[in-house]
Image: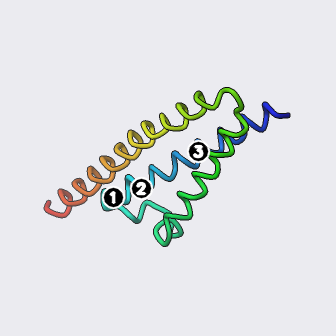
Amino acid sequence: MNELSQIFFLIIGLFINYKIYYWTFISRKGFKSETPEMFLKDPNIYAIVDIIFFVIAIIYSGSFWYFVAIIYFLSFIPAGIFADKKYKEILSELNEDKENREL
């Protein structure tokens, strides 16, 4: 049961971490409409939840805490990559709309 709870908190924590940094990246680029309304109202609540899941994952990991910490911090990379792709997708859609209006 302990291994299952370790994996559960790690996966949930990674998902929350990914989504928070994805929303942060997109909102900093100026596309706040792509983020949830609650995140825009108070992003600190999401940061606190992220920290709580990180601490729980570290506590449950036992002697492998460094492995969990590395995985957790490396989850920033895909969040930035996918958010950048979304940003470029939105910009290309806006450029297509602009070109269609000019014709």
The picture quadrant where one finds residue 56 is: top right
Q: CA distance from mark 1 to mark 2?
A: 6 Å
The mark nearer the N terminus, 3 or 1, is 3
Which of the numbered marks, if any, corresponds to residue 15? 3
Q: Residues within 10 Å of mark 3 (few under 14, many from 20)?
A: some
Tag 2 residue = 24
84 vs 89, nearest the viewer = 84
Which of the numbered marks, if any, corresponds to residue 94? none
Give the side of residue 39 with respect to residue 31, left or right.
right
- Asked whether disc 1 touches disc 2, contact meaning CB atoms under 8 Å apart, the reply is yes
Q: CA distance from mark 3 to mark 2?
A: 14 Å
- Mark 2: secondary structure: helix
Indicate the position of residue 61 as horizontal and vertical percent values: 70, 33
Amino acid type at circle 3 is: Phe
The picture quadrant where one finds residue 98 is: bottom left
Amino acid type at circle 1 is: Arg
| Image quarter (top left, top right, bottom left or bottom right) of the N terminus | top right
- Mark 1: secondary structure: helix
Give the side of residue 91 with respect to residue 15, left or right.
left
